[in-house]
Image: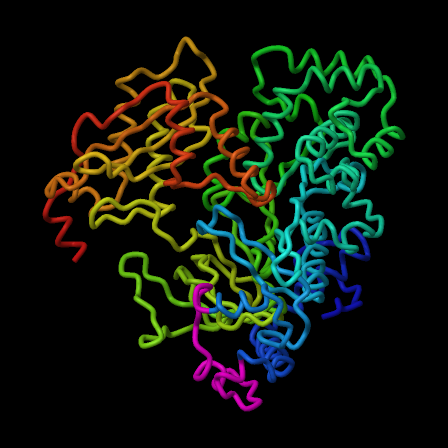
């Protein structure tokens, strides 16, 4: 879908340039006509894919209207279409899902749903993703002026791709994008210039890539106006890399040399044109990095940074205090909402507080439907009990929904697994807050604790740590059923600013109880009345433990771009790694509060 060429200023605000004016006008046109655009998108998808094996199973007989589509095509999960996906992976080139050839598979995050899923895609999806990318800076320019006067220090990485038995590439969506011509040969845009050369981004060796990107960021420190990574955890990994490697980086800066561990020929050639001896900069980096105080290190080294460009919604909210510590509280921009299955939309107010982030789904990206979601009494969905789905234009303010999509690549009524809440509207386009992934993390008995509940419990417990200038850098959990009764184990890595004022054993025991008080009534009933769950346990681990966990995941094939710390673990080698790094153990001193009256309210 081409962007209109109108030069009319957008109601979103005064555009920074002519190019921005066109992009903002396109956003306005799409969001004013959500339902008609969605109707057109569905008709296009059904028309072009009418002769595919998948759609022909449901006897649409060429129908492209919503009613026919909804009455005949079922809502599905990945597991239900996996046999067809496996046929494609094994080499079947017949039109199973799409009339267009499947160009590759996009792999889902290895830690999002416990397994790497293969999402079939087609070549033109690259253009659709590029279109969404092209809208991000025109919106950001409304809020942060002058971004054309400097560069962005972004830590971006690719992963070594694999091939399916049938010969198709399988790789993360960002690897696909960074290796595409749309990225590699992108035209110069003064509002979107990176310090990292393509050669560094496209290096599959994560050390060489990170080293080179950090080195370039330091060399161009005064030009950097924004610092970012895909996820907040990725940016913190970059800061940790600087903590470990600053002395080697300083040597290269001082003498204009390149670390011998960086052996990639294209990087060496590229850096030979950039590196020149700069002893003054080296002395500055030494002064900033040699002490123990890394508070505000981002703004100390990159003083012109206006914001951090990282995802801090959902599970990534955990990293906000640590980002604030290293950045001096810089604004954190969450710009877009996307997945391996499809890119969905963007944040029209990217400089808002993390707790206020909401995304406007662009109706031209795919056809969207929504399963109403009741957090208290979630519905059971099956082929015999089909859900009532709501169209994008018909969602209601304040309500939660599970996202279901139909894509140009051939996914039909596919449950993405994201739970979204409607927070407002831009024109007729709903805006959604990402609530969580639809899954249960912990369960010992009849209790079911999900990611949002666990995150809330951790946040409440960390309030107790504030007087000690201590925060939780990272965490994960484990349902330990080796004890009788079983109990929740929470692994914490802590950041304490003053070692002379660290929290005591008693304080950390209170954190265990605070977490239990924050969990749902079913959990507390099991603890108090049924005695089917034992006291919650917090195991504090050494600094750098979760860095090791990430390295382990990457060594087993996880994408450095898409990696997110799993909020629940049960894989024995990971548990052994965590337990080998435990430095203290803490339990709830008493049972949490629970009464039968609360239980009756839940019924």
Q: How many marks?
A: 0
Comparing 34 with 196, the one in front is: 196
Estimate the x, y position of residue 98 in percent, counting from the top left. 62, 74
Left/right placement of residue 479 relative to residue 56 reads: left
* Residue 200 shows in the view: yes
Q: Which quadrant is the N terminus positioned in?
A: bottom right
Estimate the x, y position of residue 377 in percent, counting from the top left. 27, 61
Estimate the x, y position of residue 43 in percent, counting from the top left. 60, 81
Q: Is residue 522 magenta?
A: no
Residue range corresponding to the magenta coloring: 55-80
Residue in the image at 62% along x and 20% along y = 244
* Rendered image coloring scheme: rainbow
Q: Which quadrant is the C terminus positioned in?
A: bottom left
User: In the picture shown, does residue 536 fall above or below 115?
Assistant: above
Residue in the image at 69% along x and 11% along y = 287
Comparing 260 with 439, the one in front is: 260
* Residue 455 shows in the view: no
Comparing 123 with 404, the one in front is: 123
Q: Is residue 79 magenta?
A: yes
């Amino acid at each position: 879908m081409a962007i209109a060429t109108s030069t009319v200023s957008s109601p979103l605000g005064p555009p920074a340039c002519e190019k921005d004016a066109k992009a903002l006008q396109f956003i306005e046109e799409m969001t004013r006509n959500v339902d008609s655009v969605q109707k057109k998108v569905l008709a296009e998808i059904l028309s072009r894919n009418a002769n595919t094996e998948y759609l022909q199973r449901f006897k649409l007989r060429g129908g492209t209207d919503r009613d026919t589509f909804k009455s005949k095509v079922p809502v599905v999960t990945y597991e239900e279409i996996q046999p067809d996906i496996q046929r494609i992976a094994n080499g079947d080139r017949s039109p199973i899902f799409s009339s267009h050839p499947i160009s590759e598979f996009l792999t889902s995050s290895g830690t999002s749903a416990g397994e790497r899923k293969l999402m079939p895609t087609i070549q033109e999806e690259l253009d659709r993703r590029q279109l969404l990318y092209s809208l991000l800076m025109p919106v950001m320019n409304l809020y942060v002026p002058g971004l054309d006067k400097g560069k962005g220090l972004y830590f971006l990485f690719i992963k070594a791709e694999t091939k399916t038995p049938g010969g198709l590439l399988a790789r993360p969506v960002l690897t696909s994008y960074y290796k595409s011509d749309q990225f590699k040969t992108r035209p110069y845009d003064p509002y979107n210039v990176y310090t990292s050369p393509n050669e560094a981004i496209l290096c599959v060796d994560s050390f060489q890539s990170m080293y080179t990107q950090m080195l370039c960021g330091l060399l161009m420190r005064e030009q950097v106006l924004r610092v970012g990574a895909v996820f907040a955890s990725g940016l913190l990994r970059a800061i940790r890399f600087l903590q470990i490697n600053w002395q080697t980086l300083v040597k290269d800066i001082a003498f204009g040399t390149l670390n011998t561990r960086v052996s990639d020929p294209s990087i060496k050639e590229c850096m030979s044109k950039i590196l020149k001896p700069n002893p003054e900069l080296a002395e500055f980096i030494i002064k900033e990095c040699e002490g123990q105080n890394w508070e505000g290190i981002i703004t100390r080294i990159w003083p012109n940074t206006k914001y951090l460009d990282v995802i801090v919604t959902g599970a990534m909210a955990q990293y906000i205090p640590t980002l604030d510590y290293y950045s001096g509280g810089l604004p954190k921009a969450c710009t877009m909402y996307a997945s391996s299955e499809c890119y969905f939309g963007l944040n029209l107010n990217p400089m808002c507080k993390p707790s206020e982030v909401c995304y406007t789904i662009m109706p031209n990206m795919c056809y969207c439907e929504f399963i109403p979601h009741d957090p208290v009494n979630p519905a059971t969905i099956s082929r015999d009990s089909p859900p009532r789905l709501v169209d994008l234009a018909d969602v209601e303010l304040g309500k939660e929904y599970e996202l279901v999509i139909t894509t140009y690549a051939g996914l039909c009524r596919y449950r993405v697994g994201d739970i979204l809440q409607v927070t407002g509207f831009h024109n007729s386009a709903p805006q959604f807050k990402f609530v969580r992934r639809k899954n249960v993390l912990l369960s010992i008995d009849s209790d079911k604790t999900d990611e949002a509940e666990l995150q809330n419990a951790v946040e409440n417990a960390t309030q107790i740590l504030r007087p000690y200038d201590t925060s939780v850098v990272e965490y994960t959990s484990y349902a330990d059923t080796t004890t009788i009764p079983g109990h929740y184990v929470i692994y914490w890595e802590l950041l304490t600013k003053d070692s002379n004022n660290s929290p005591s054993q008693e304080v950390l025991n209170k954190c265990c109880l605070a977490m239990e008080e924050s969990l749902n009534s079913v959990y507390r009933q099991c603890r108090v009345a049924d005695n089917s769950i034992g006291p919650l346990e917090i195991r504090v681990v050494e600094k750098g433990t979760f860095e090791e966990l990430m390295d382990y995941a990457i060594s087993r094939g996880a994408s450095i771009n898409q990696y997110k710390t799993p909020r629940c673990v049960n894989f024995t080698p990971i548990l052994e790694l965590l337990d080998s790094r435990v430095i203290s153990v803490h339990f709830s001193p008493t049972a949490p509060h629970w009464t039968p009256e609360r239980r009756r309210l839940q019924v």
